[in-house]
Amino acid sequence: MSGRSLLVSILALSCLLMVPFAFAQTLTPKFKVWPRTPQTNAAIATGTTTSVTVRHWSSSFTFNSNVYHYSMVGTNPSSGSATTTVSAEIQPLNFKFSDGHEIEANRVITPLIDSPIFQKTSLPGGFGQLADVEQRSNFHAIVAAKSPSYHVHLAQPLLLSSITVNVPAGSGGTQTLSNGTRIGLVDFAFMQQVVNGVLSARDFNPTTLPILLTGNVFEYENMPSNCCVVGFHGAVSIEPGEIVTFVYTAYPSPGVFSGNFEDITAASHEVAEWMDDPFTNNVVPAWGDPSQPTVCVNNLLEVGDPIENFAKPAFSATVNGRTYHPQDIAFFSWFAHQKPSIGRNGQYSYISPPKLTAPPPSCH
């Protein structure tokens, strides 16, 4: 038995829960923050870590007399023009369920590679890869004044061989939607063990971005009716002195979720958040969901989260005649309560007209 086969078999046995699987009735896309490890600490946020990891820069801002440290991928745009290129790997994950159905990632590999995440195209704010153009727009006032040739690129990805995960009956199942699309639902606790196992088995170079990719497979928390987690990003320490940052994303087919949430909506959300909070430890003033702005829901610089619950969180972007649906994002100035915003056109979110028109109000 290969090491990878042994890995997923052990995971399957350890997570076998002898309970019936009840299908979810409502499919709502959600995102999770990967649990932070002791290694993702203040040393990273303040730029003093000695760990080998993705290239990043650190700075801080002050709000209400409190200092907030943060780190982002690339170099500081205030330091002048520079181009950072991060190598990327795509790790396809296939899921085989106890009902005999298997949902493979193979059909979505090429669309992801051909998407604006890796290919340059015309986008709001410029021509280039999505996360690069977003970041230049995020810090537009600084880029325009100090670093007009500033970029953070993802290299064309290395495609790794697929890994098949056997899902025990008590940890997931499949269902067929009314439009004929078959989806898989997996317990998030089980998925955490799978992801940790894959990251350990593959031993990724900590300076790269591994993207763990699946198709119509989504996670639920505690019970299948509480679904559907479509993506997360995080940082783990597999080897001493190394921190691997990563993205996990589903690639939903059209019609699985309402609105325009499909194809790279989840992937673009997570890549943008990896860019601006690679270690999931950029603490900012607590903020509320724009639909309930006075109720605190988060205190991290997660640029996709304030937008995800809008009726249509995504926008259209075309590459070589194919239309994709990346998600809109919040700008740094929104989290930092900067007035005016340093974002493109003085906005607090990326797409015009902006969904966010002012920093978040106080929440409790």
Image: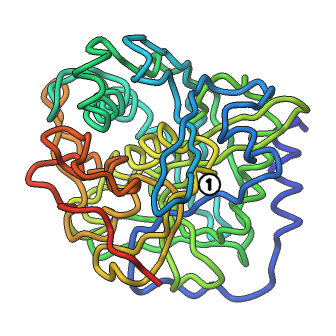
Q: Is residue 42 visible?
A: yes
Where residue 13 appears, as percent x and y from the top left, is 87, 65
- The residue closer to the viewer here, 299 or 24, is 299
The local secondary structure at tag 1 comes to strand
Q: Which residue is mark 1?
A: 95
Up-down: is 116 above or below 272? above
Answer with left or right where residue 85 lies relative to residue 212: left
| Residue type at tag 1 | Phe
Residue depicted at 47% across the width and 52% down the height: 250
Q: Badge 1, how many Cα within 10 Å: few under 14, some, many 20+?
A: many
Snapshot quadrant of residue 355:
bottom left
Residue depicted at 84% across the width and 38% down the height: 238
Where residue 45 appears, as percent x and y from the top left, is 65, 41
Residue depicted at 42% across the width and 80% down the height: 363
Q: Is residue 115 visible?
A: no
Where residue 59 appears, as percent x and y from the top left, is 54, 36
Give the quadrant of the N terminus. Answer: top right
Answer with left or right where residue 193 lies relative to residue 132: right
- The residue closer to the viewer here, 171 or 205, is 205
